């Protein structure tokens, strides 16, 4: 027998064993972590076990103890023999000012891979959006900025936090972008950069350091009445940075580190989406609902789940009720540039 293990990047692996004791060799192949005398090691990194036991008498791995030792939030479905990992909360500290920007290697709608680090040596803007957001209409506005500032050393890298490439495809085709646009169905971008809402941008300098953590940054003012954010404020600051090297004021925009519950919510969402793709609808809904309980104000979870369940993420009753509650709560997680 085997279980399905969804790794921290959303990849799916079959691992031999019984829930939740698995073959050490299979787990090592799936995740890169190997049990050694020094602890759990991957490459040059070793995590000491400090007295914790993760191996059984026959040298299989207790998956729950293993995940706990590494700090991985893990969602489990016993009936369907599926487990999903998310990175530890500290993994999203890469969005802090001065931190090395985490790399991303993600596919476009046709499966071609694009790496964020391939643009190193230039100023970069990571733009996140989704088909369930009005920002799906803004790709052409980002194209205009790329065409204006690209010759001066700027590269835009656009990520759709979507449930499938086909959800994003019509908006990418309509926007006719002149920059890479990829689709992140596993939401690793949200995990690594602490993003809980879109449209968010992160700025990265030529040396690969974050100079502006995630802030809400619409491409244009089509939805200004809703966002209450003036797109020009972001774009003018971006022009000053690209043209004159003027760093943005980040005193009021601290980088976001996702909470333990927030990371577990992403694991639950990953598990729910996987089960939904297999046709296990009832089980999928349980995990998607659990994700919402854990991260009620995280739009990358909440609104994406509305779309996953086939409900209307724009004008449906659930979304309208959610939006009203969120607005009355002071729009948590919706931070524009200071």
Image (cartoon, grey):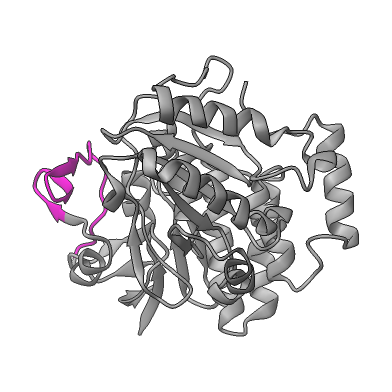
Number of marks present in the image shown: 0
**Segment tinted magenta in the rendering:** 35-57
Q: Position of residue 301 (x, y in %)?
A: 64, 54
Q: Position of residue 109 (x, y in %)?
A: 48, 73
Q: Nearer the viewer, residue 308 or 75?
A: 308
Majority secondary structure in the magenta region: loop
Q: Nearer the viewer, residue 34 or 292?
A: 292
Q: Is 194 left or right of 102, judged from the image as shown?
A: right
Whether residue 39 is visible: yes
- The relative height of residue 248 versus residue 87 in the rendered view (above or below) is above
- Looking at this view, name the residue that lies furthest to the left: 37
Q: Position of residue 220 (x, y in %)?
A: 69, 44
Q: Nearer the viewer, residue 287 or 36?
A: 287
> Dividing the image into 4 quarters, which one contains the N terminus?
bottom left
Which residue is drawn at the image coordinates 62% and 85% (left, top)?
279
> Dividing the image into 4 quarters, which one contains the C terminus?
top right
Q: Nearer the viewer, residue 325 or 209?
A: 209
Which residue is drawn at the image coordinates 35% and 24% (left, top)?
98
């Amino acid at each position: 027998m085997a279980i399905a293990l969804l790794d921290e990047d959303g990849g799916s692996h079959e691992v031999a064993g019984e829930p939740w004791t698995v073959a050490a060799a299979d787990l090592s192949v799936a995740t890169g972590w190997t049990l050694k005398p020094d602890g759990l090691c991957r490459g040059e990194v070793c995590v000491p076990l400090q007295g914790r036991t993760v191996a059984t008498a026959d040298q299989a791995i207790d998956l729950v103890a293993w995940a706990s030792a590494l700090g991985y939030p893990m969602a489990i479905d016993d009936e369907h023999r599926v487990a999903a990992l998310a990175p530890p909360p500290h993994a999203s500290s890469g969005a802090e000012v001065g931190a090395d920007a985490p790399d991303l290697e993600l596919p476009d709608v046709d499966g071609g891979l694009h790496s964020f680090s391939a643009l190193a040596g230039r100023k970069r803007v990571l733009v996140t959006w989704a088909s369930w957001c009005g920002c799906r209409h803004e790709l052409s506005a980002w194209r205009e900025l790329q065409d204006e500032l690209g010759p001066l050393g700027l590269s835009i890298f656009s990520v759709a936090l979507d449930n499938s490439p086909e959800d994003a495809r019509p908006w990418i085709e309509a926007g006719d972008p002149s920059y890479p646009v990829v689709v992140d169905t596993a939401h690793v971008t949200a995990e690594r950069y602490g993003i809980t809402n879109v449209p968010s941008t992160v700025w990265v300098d030529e040396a690969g350091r974050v100079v502006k953590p995630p802030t809400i940054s619409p491409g244009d003012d089509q939805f200004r009445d809703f966002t209450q954010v003036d797109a020009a404020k972001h774009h003018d600051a971006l022009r000053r940075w690209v043209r004159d090297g003027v760093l943005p004021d980040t005193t009021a925009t601290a980088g976001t580190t996702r909470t333990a519950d927030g990371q577990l919510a992403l694991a639950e969402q990953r598990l729910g989406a996987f089960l939904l793709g297999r046709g296990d609808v009832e089980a999928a809904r349980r995990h998607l609902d659990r994700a919402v309980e854990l991260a009620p104000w995280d739009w990358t979870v909440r609104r994406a789940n509305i779309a996953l369940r086939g409900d209307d993420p724009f004008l449906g009753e659930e979304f309208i009720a959610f939006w009203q509650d969120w607005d009355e709560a002071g729009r948590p997680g919706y931070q524009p540039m200071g």
